[in-house]
Amino acid sequence: MQQAAKEIQQENYDEALAHLSEAWQKGTHTPEKALLFGQVYRQMLDYPKAKEYLQEALRLKADFRPAQLMLADTLLALNQPKEARPILQNLLAAGYEPGQTAFLMGLAATKDGQYSEALDYFRKAETDPKMAQEAKFQASLALAALNRVKEAKQAMEESIALNPQSQTADFAKRYMGVLSQRTDALRPFRITVSSGFDYDSNVTLSPGGGTEATTVSGKASAVFSQTALLEYTVLPAGPFSLLTQYSYYQNFHPAVTGYDQMTHFMGLTPTYAFKNGRFWLPLSYTYMDLQSDKYYTGFLVTPTYLHQITEKVGLEVGARYNNQRFWTPLFLNQDNRSGNLWGGNVGMYYFFKKQTGFVQARVGYWNNNTQGDNWDSNSYNLLLSLLWPISDKLKYSMFLDLTLQPFSNTWFNGEVIGNVQGNAL
């Protein structure tokens, strides 16, 4: 046993395991021997074997505190926080190694996605000088998960200052760059202004983001456009956030009259982040003028849930509802495009380069139920897309968007032939 302990101190784990095996086979099975087995197997990263011997140590001596603490740590390494929690709660009640025990309780809460609880435990662990640096590092990660990024940066800086040459400090220095990027990304207020020039070979109208062109000119024109976007993000502590948006868009067609538009968009997107997923509920209202006349209004809601199946694979499920109203005078009731659009979509993501890039495949279906029979339709959509991060500031994106849109009824143009109205095209 003494020789095995000496080999463990010198990090000669294979030799220590040989001595322990001999002592275990020839001598009495004791909780101390089982604890050393667990310690050696932990150092060799064989967590299932370590768990087996630590449980044996506790079978031999139920209140063996060092084995309880090491078993809880091993269970966390095996991603079994529910099994570790009762053991750690027992150790906290007994007052055994309060700093390390509180630290492990924080890790268990983190694995369960309970970041506020984890932060409280890491704060307690910081009072133990032996655990202070690692506890501050983990507290910073918990604060970042709670969107308290400024506090996370401060905690990370404090962690580095405790021992700048340690391995934990090295991890913290690298993570500081990520926190700095998140600080920039989470600025609550943003304004974007742009102007553009384009050439359209066939000027059309497609209000509300629809796939069909509601009006086709058959003429070409240069297009001048201007856009303004205002965004304000509410980021309370916790998994909830709220994005508010207003945008303005206007275009001009010098060669074609009757197609100049001005659009106002107002959006509200509440988001809730889970441990392995994210749910968001975009709500928006669009108002569109055509040649200074009220042309289109629409209310759109697209609830979406993205579930992270693995680190690289995600499943997306979404729904879509769009209430659309067109305000132009009608010649035929059958040509009324106002109505409701319902639908949904399912997609898969494959993430790479630390989730900064992805490949996406998504299928969708929408039913456009309008007041006029001419515009009733079903849409079947396939979207394939790729986002490739070439560098931190340069990304390459490409997509293929295919839509099949069969209309439900024969087109009715209102012509009268032989005293019968309703000539179909």
Image (cartoon, rainbow, N blue to C red):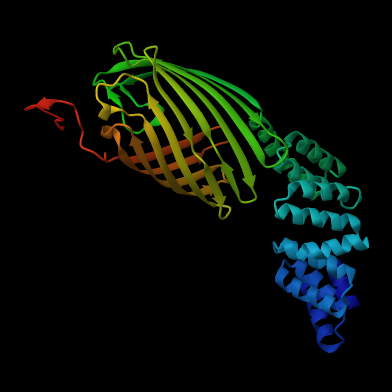
Which of 175/88 is in front? Answer: 88
Q: In this view, does 378 lie to the left or right of 132?
A: left
Query: Toward which corner of the image does residue 34 lie, by quadrant?
Result: bottom right
Q: Is residue 247 left or right of residue 155?
A: left
Residue 170 position (above or below residue 107): above
Farthest bottom residue in view = 26
Residue 138 visible somewhere in the drawing = no
Q: Is residue 216 left or right of residue 133?
A: left
Q: In this view, does 241 lie to the left or right of 350?
A: right
Report x, y in % for residue 147.
Answer: 70, 38
Please tell me which residue is depicted at 50% across the width and 45% down the height of the picture: 358
Report x, y in % for residue 380.
Answer: 34, 44
Which of 26/124 is in front? Answer: 124
Badge count: 0
Give the quarter of the figure containing the C terminus. Answer: top left
Residue 154 position (above or below residue 90): above
Give the quarter of the figure containing the N terminus. Answer: bottom right
